[in-house]
Image: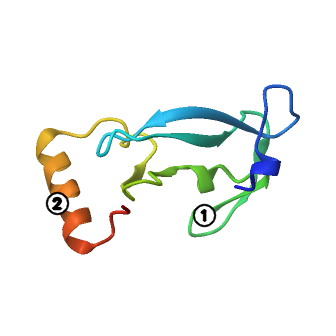
């Protein structure tokens, strides 16, 4: 997101900002998410794909750590078991996808 467009405490932005900690590398980063009431479902396609007016909340459902590249659904991002943590950390390191 463009830093000039980043929401502030007093802005009329449709997004809120908060700090999130990555469960893999423990890096803290800023996360933007839409405020409730800033979007509404306009229609749903025959394949169940929703279309929204205003901010599209689907764009904010996947959280990505800017340090290590770990990505997960919003609901799964904070909680990672030890087994999964080791596998993800190893995969990111071995693949060269982890940022240094």
Left or right for 95, reference 4: left
Which of 99 and 77 lies nearest the eye of the viewer?
99
**Residue closest to the far left:** 83
Compared to residue 17, the image places residue 85 above or below, namely below
Q: From the viewer's perspective, is residue 78 above or below residue 49?
A: above
The dot on residue 91 is none
Q: The residue tagged with tag 1: helix, strand or loop?
A: loop
Measured as percent of width and height from the top left, residue 57 is found at 65, 49
Contact check, label 2 and label 1, Cβ < 8 Å = no
Q: Position of residue 34 (x, y in %)?
A: 69, 41
Mark-to-mark CA distance, 2 and 1: 34 Å
Q: Which badge, 2 or 1, is on the more N-terminal residue?
A: 1
Q: Is residue 45 left or right of residue 7?
A: left
Q: Nearer the viewer, residue 41 or 6?
A: 6
Q: Compare residues 41 and 98 and report the one nearer the observer.
A: 98
Q: Locate the C terminus by quadrant.
A: bottom left
Residue drawn where x is 16% and y is 60% of the image: 90
Q: Where does the image place residue 79, in percent across and percent down from the top left?
A: 30, 35
Q: Residue at x 22, y 56 (%)?
A: 88
- The numbered dot on residue 49 is 1
Residue density around tag 1, few if under 14, some if 14–19, many if 20 or more, within 10 Å? few
Q: Quadrant of residue 19?
A: top right
Query: Crowding at label 2, few (<14), some or many (≥20) Cα neighbours within 10 Å?
Result: few
Q: Which residue is mark 2?
A: 90
Q: How many marks?
A: 2
């Amino acid at each position: 997101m463009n830093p000039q467009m980043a929401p502030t405490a007093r802005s009329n932005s449709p997004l809120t900002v908060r700090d999130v900690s990555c469960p893999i590398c423990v890096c803290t980063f800023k996360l933007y998410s839409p405020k409730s009431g800033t979007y509404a479902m306009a229609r749903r396609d025959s394949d169940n794909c929703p279309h929204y007016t205003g901010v599209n909340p689907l764009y904010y459902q996947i959280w990505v750590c800017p340090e290590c590249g770990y990505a997960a659904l919003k609901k799964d991002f904070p909680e990672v078991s030890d087994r999964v943590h080791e596998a993800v950390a190893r995969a990111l390191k071995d693949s060269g996808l982890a940022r240094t």
